[in-house]
Image (tube, helix red, strand yellow):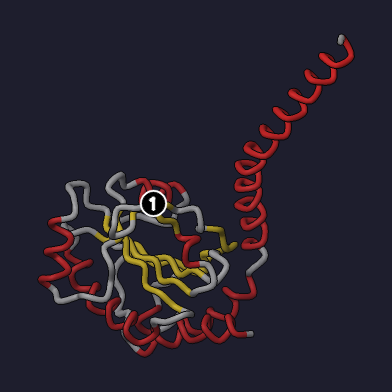
Amino acid sequence: MKVLLLAAAAGAIAGSLLLYGKLGGDVYDGEAVVANAGVACSARNDVAAALDPFIRGEMAAVQLADPPSYMGDLSFKSPEGNDASLSDWNGKIVVFNLWATWCAPCRAEMPALSNLQAAFSGEDFEVVAVNIDTSGADRPLAFLSDIEVANLPLYSDQSTDIFTTLKQKGLAFGMPTTLIVDKDGCQVAHLSGPAEWDSDDAKALVAVLMDRKQS
């Protein structure tokens, strides 16, 4: 009987350890994925080097990442109010833009981002524009309607945590703020302030990343 009780106790402990390892492993693995992605991104200077000749004209204010860094864990809300993160677009080139209704340059820039989305959208590219208004969705939705932008869904971060995070990384100083992210979630360049995203210079920059994605 004593042997049976000891065996049962050992089995229960083993089961608990297995459950703990499984649950704890999920969290650990997630952290490991981010850490490993960060290491992989830091070695992507070849992408930045390929972009360098295209930092000109309307894209002259773009700053190359040195080194590139992983941004897939930036989190925000989907148009339906569900949790989303930049990693949801892994496999695509992403122009990730932060904007607000009180930002006059954002109003000027948004139609150009919409045109860029129309020019390149598909399986390989996406403009992900995240609104950081803190007062709800009504004003941002009215804003997009007013400027007749219908192809950029209303992603939002009412906490403004993304802007704070990017500011701490030296990647955000005002609005709008834009990251250029490669297919692996690596931020390879950023831009503070507005840009003519539907210009030939912007399209050439995106085309370089699209070409590298296929290689």
Q: Who's the residue at 10% across and 71% down the image? A: 146
For residue 133, side relative to residue 54 (left or right): left
The image position of residue 26, as x and y in percent, is: 62, 44
Q: Residue furthest top?
A: 2
Residue 130 vertical position relative to residue 45 in the rendered view, above or below: above
Q: Which residue is mark 1?
A: 83
- The answer to which image quadrant residue 47 occupies is bottom right
Residue, x 41% and y 55% (percent of image)?
Answer: 84
* Residue 104 % position (x, y): 17, 64
Q: Is residue 135 above or below residue 199?
A: above
Kindly give the residue lying farthest to the bottom in the view shown.
Answer: 200
What's under tag 1, amino acid-wise?
A: Asp
Q: Is residue 109 left or right of residue 102?
A: right
In-front residue for pair 193/164: 164
Q: In this rendering, would 45 be left or right of 147?
A: right
Q: Nearer the viewer, residue 20 or 133?
A: 20
The image quadrant where one finds the N terminus is top right
Closer to the camera in the image, 37 or 79: 79
Along the line of sight, the residue nearer the viewer: 140 or 104: 140
Dot 1 falls on a residue whose secondary structure is strand
Residue at 18% x, 55% y: name it.
137
* Residue 110 screen position, x and y as percent: 24, 72
The residue furthest front is 1
Q: In the picture, which quadrant includes the C terminus?
A: bottom right
